[in-house]
Image: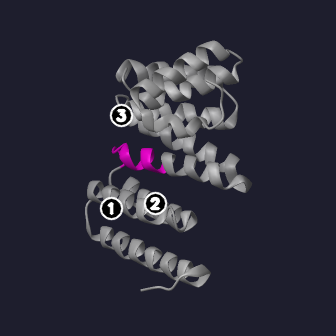
Amino acid sequence: HPGKGANGRLQRAAEANQKGLDISTEAYDLNARTEIHIVEASYELLKKHSPKAALAIVKSFTDRAKTMDPSDFQPYALQGKADLIKAKWDGSSANIAIVSAQQNLKKAIELNSLDALNYVLLAESQLLEQKNIDEGLQNIDMALKLNPQLGDAYAIQGLLLMTKGDRDAGNSAIHKALTLNKNLAYLYGERRL
């Protein structure tokens, strides 16, 4: 069992990285759909210890899955989600990650226009970019048409509306998000509701 302190944390992180790599390597022998599930599991395992390594694994598998079945929206959606995560923690390449997220999410929507979460993620990328806020709101409208109970959609809608300066409508959307999903409360920190 690894020791305590910095060396112990480093050892545990290295073991988690290796375990994630071992799990992910097994995915090479499986079909694309199963591969995506293994990538998601390995990503969850790795993200707390080494986001950079986790994102590299996700990228390698999504690239492979895209070539195996170009008509499957899931690899594009997963890569778009990974790009958004990268944009949030890696400030030096945030703009590149946002552009990549938008390209992947638009392709996922093109392949499957009925997945509400991809519209939410695309709107979130527009929020992070602080551009195309109206288009982001249109993406949220589409998500809510597909799934009117999607708390994440209301959360991003609220933040987009606040970005436009409509504080009352933004607060209303955020309250709706919190009503639907109390787990979203941490996202708003000190934002006055």
Residue 80 place in picture, x, y as percent: 50, 46
Q: Residue at x 25, y 65 (%)?
A: 30
As for residue 75 lying within the magenta part, the answer is yes
**Residue 20 in the image: above or below residue 94:** below
Packing grade of label 1 (10 A; few <14, some 14-19, many >=20) is many
At label 1, the amino acid type is Ile
Q: Residue at x 37, y 20 (%)?
A: 148
Mark positioned earlier in the residue sequence (3 or 1)? 1
| Residue 163 as seen in the image, left or right of residue 47 | right
Q: Residue at x 34, y 56 (%)?
A: 36
Inspect this view and state whether residue 67 appears. yes
At label 2, the amino acid type is Val
Residue 177 place in picture, x, y as percent: 47, 26
Disc number placed over residue 38 in the picture, else none = 1
Q: Are marks 2 and 3 in contact (CB under 8 Å)?
A: no
- Dot 1 falls on a residue whose secondary structure is helix
Mark 2 or mark 3, which is nearer to you?
2
- Dot 2 falls on a residue whose secondary structure is helix
Mark 2, residue position: 58
Q: Residue 126 is drawn in which quadrant?
A: top right
Q: Which residues are magenta?
A: 70-79
From the viewer's side, name the closer residue of 31 and 43.
43
Residue 15 place in picture, x, y as percent: 45, 80
